[in-house]
Amino acid sequence: LGETMHFDENGDPPALYELVNWQNTNGKIEFKIVGRYDSTASQNEKFQLNEKDIIWSQGKMEVPISVCSDPCIPGTRRVPRKAEPFCCFDCIACKDGEYSNTTDCYRCPDYFWSSIYRNVCTAMPEEYLAFADPLAIALLAVALFGFVLMLAVIAIMIWFHELSRSKNDSIMPLVVLMATVAFSFASTLSFLGKPVDITCRAQRALIFFLLTLSISCLLTKIVGLIAKGLVGIRRKWWGGTIPPFLNSLPWLRKPLVVWSLCLCIQVALCSIVEFLGKSKPVQNLGALVGTIIWECTRTSSFWLTLPLIFLGFLAGSTFYLAYVSGRVSTIGPEPKFMSYNILFCFIVFIAFIPAYGSTQGRFAVATEIFAINAVAYSFIGCIFFPKCYNIIFTVLLILFIMKKYIQFGVFFRTGSVVFSVIFSSL
C-alpha cells in the first residue's frame, strides 16, 4: 500500500484507531468518523476528536450523564441503593454536629457545631445572662427601682426617725434591715455576666447571709415587741401561763446577741457547703444542643439543704412568735405585717424550687434574680410601707390641720407639742 509500518520493541504494530459515530439519519444508520487515535503521532496529535460532529442518543448534541444520580452537595453523604449499580445512590443530610464537603460526614471538633447547611463547622455560641440581654435589663430595672425605693424609705426613716419606731424601741434592727434589703437588690449584679470563680463562690453564701440577717432583724424586732407585751401575752395564752423560754426574751432582745447567734451558725453552714461542694464556672454542652451554657456548678443537694434548713427554722420561729404576739392587742399590728412577710417568703421559696430545677442557662439565673427581688420587695411592702404610710399620712394630716385651723404665728408655738403627742402615740 506504499505505507511504512513501524513496529515497537516487542514487535507489535502501532495502534491506529478511528472513532466512528453511529448516526440515525432518516431511518438509516450511517457511520461517521468523528476522530482518530494514532500512537505514532506526536504527543499533541495522538488523539483527535471533533465533538461538533457527534450525535448522541435521541438526536441530542449534549453529552449525556453517565450515572443515575447527581453528585451529592456539601452537607450530605452518599447512601448506595440496594440492587442497583454503584453509581446509583441517595444523598442524605448529615446529622447535627457533623459536616461534609465530600461524600462522607465527619464529626465536628469539640466546642464546634455544624452550620445550618452542614457544610462547615463553626464555634458554638455561648449562653449566659449578659448585661446587654433584654431579660437582664428588665430584671436590673426591677432591682434598680427597688433599690431607689429603699433609699427613699431610708431617707424617710432618717428624717422622721422619731416617728419610725415605737416608744422605747431600738432603732438598730430597723437600720440594719433597711441596709440589708438595699444590699439584696444590689447583690443581683453578681448573677449577671459570664460566671467566674469569685462570683460562683459568693452568690449563694451572700444570699444566705443577707436572708439570715434580714430574718434575724425581724426576730429581734418581734422579741422586743413580745418583751414589752409579756403581760398581755400572759393574759392571752392558754391557761393563763406562758412557756418558760419566753421569760428570757428580755435577754434575747439585744440585737447583737440574736445577730451573732444566727449569723455564726449560718456562716458555719455556708463554709461547710463551700468547702465540701466547691462551686465553679463550667461549660454545659448537654443542656442545649449546639450551645455552650456557662453556669456555676450546683452544689450537692444534701449540703445545700443545711443552710436552707436553718434558714427555714429561723423563718418559722419568727413566724410563730409573730403569730403569737399578733393575738395580743396591746402590741399593735406590726407582728401581723411580719407574719405576712414571712408567709410571702415561704410562697416565693415554694415556687422557686420547681422553677429553678426545670430551667437551664440564663433562665435559671433569671429565676434566682426574680426570687431575690420578690423577697426584697416583700420586706418593703410588709415592713416599711406601713411605717412610711403612717409617717407621711400623719405628717400631712397635722400640716393640713395646722394650716387650716391654726394661724401662722401659733404654728411654731404649738408644733412641738403636737409632734410630741404624735411621738407618744406611735
Image (cartoon, rainbow, N blue to C red):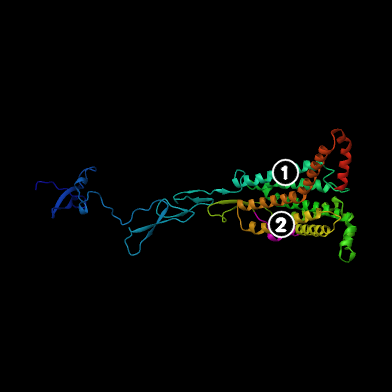
Q: Nearer the viewer, mark 2 or mark 1?
A: 1
Taking the view exactly as shown, the residue that stands out farthest to the top is: 409
Which SS does the magenta portion mostly show?
helix
Q: Nearer the viewer, residue 256 or 385?
A: 385
Taking the view exactly as shown, the residue that stands out farthest to the left is: 1
Q: Is residue 187 magenta?
A: no
Residue drawn at x 13%, y 53% as measured from the top left: 26
Mark 1 belongs to which amino acid? Answer: Leu
Residue 329: x and y in percent read: 85, 57
Which span is picked out in magenta? Answer: 297-309
Residue 216: x and y in percent read: 80, 53
Which residue does the numbered mark 1 point to in the structure image?
149
Residue 276: x and y in percent read: 71, 57
Q: Quadrant of residue 341?
A: bottom right
C-alpha span from label 2 to label 1:
38 Å
Q: Residues within 10 Å of mark 1 (few under 14, many from 20)?
A: some
Q: Is residue 28 left or right of residue 133?
A: left
Residue 83: x and y in percent read: 33, 65
Q: Nearer the viewer, residue 219 or 328?
A: 328
Q: Which mark is residue 251?
A: none
Residue drawn at x 82%, y 48% as measured from the top left: 173
Q: Is residue 298 magenta?
A: yes
Which residue does the numbered mark 2 point to in the structure image?
276
**Along the polypeptide, which appears first: circle 2 or circle 1?**
1
How many marks are shown on the rendered structure?
A: 2
Residue drawn at x 88%, y 39% as measured from the top left: 416
